[in-house]
Amino acid sequence: MSADNAAQARQASIGDCLCAARVRLPRREAELLVSHALEVPRSALYAFRERPVAPQAAMRCAAWVDRRTRGEPVAYILGRREFWGMDLEVSPAVLIPRPDTETLVAAALPHIDDGTEVLDLGTGCGAVALAIAAERPAARITATDIDSHCVALCRRNAARLGLPVQTAVADGLERFPGGLDAIVSNPPYVAQDDPHLRVGDLRYEPRHALVGGPSGIEFIERLVREAPDHLRPGGWLCIEHGWDQSAVVRALYLAAGFRRVRGHRDLEDRPRVMVGQRPSEGRQQ
């Protein structure tokens, strides 16, 4: 068998293993695992098929494929995840950034200018805060999380990417009595008995970053209720929520006195983000 055909056979074998494990995108994940194991770009897997594989790289790839077939997310295996065009370090201490959350960034950006005071609540690895910083470098952005490991990871990502984001360990809005122009958050919003928590990548992700309470909406309810006291008049609250929570979240915004309340849909055209503005002084909804 030629080297070219052998390389194809190896990659096909890995893809077959991932297919058997019911991985949703087996070819893409096979390419990611192999390219990172070989420390080459994915394009090199096809451009330089004749390149020999070092035994250490082959062993590393085999171990990673075994972990993936047992269900461990690729992002945790590699310790990396792409978000908003950025390569982010991730770990099992943080929620894995997903393309749906880019909807939150896109919805928040029109309400953020130079000098805008922005809080990213529950930052995890810093994905949302760093994406906003990349687009609005003159904004004043603070990323917080209740977990110090998340804050440390966000800080490392910010330093490596050279993005101006401040970090702090904080529980909710307690450290920010007022003066914010925008609050953005991808909060926990899954119900504690949701069956999806027992399948796929969610089995490995930190439960406190996923579960928002018995029904899933409790954390969002608290955040929407408290946010007006921490926003300047005219400030914006931008929240990611579950695809089936849009009507409830909209009602919470209106009950808290927000105006210009608007929903945004994700890449699969599902309701995913709600934004609303705190009224200026003397104005009512």
Image (tube, grey):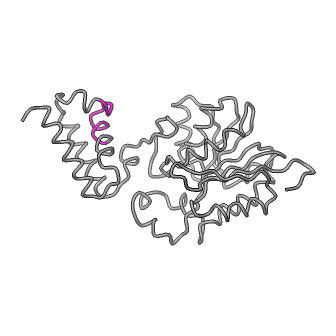
Above or below residue 60? Residue 2 is above
Image height check: is 87 above or below 65? above
x and y, in percent, of residue 244 in the image: 58, 64
In the depicted view, which residue is nearer to us: 158 or 136? 136
- Residue furthest to the right: 282
Q: Is residue 41 magenta?
A: yes
In percent of width and height, residue 143 lies at 63, 43
- At x 67%, y 65%, the residue is 248
- Viewer-closest of 135 and 268: 268
Residue nearer the viewer, 173 or 198: 198
User: Going by the picture, which residue comes out furthest to the left?
Assistant: 1
Quadrant of res 135: top right
Q: Which residues are magenta?
A: 33-43
Q: Is residue 182 left or right of residue 121?
A: right
Q: Is 158 drawn above or below residue 123 in the view shown?
A: above
Number of numbered tags placed on the structure image:
0
Taking the image as shown, residue 195 lies to the left or right of residue 5, namely right
Quadrant where the image shows the C terminus: bottom right
Spot occupied by residue 264 in the image (x, y as percentages of width and height)? 63, 50
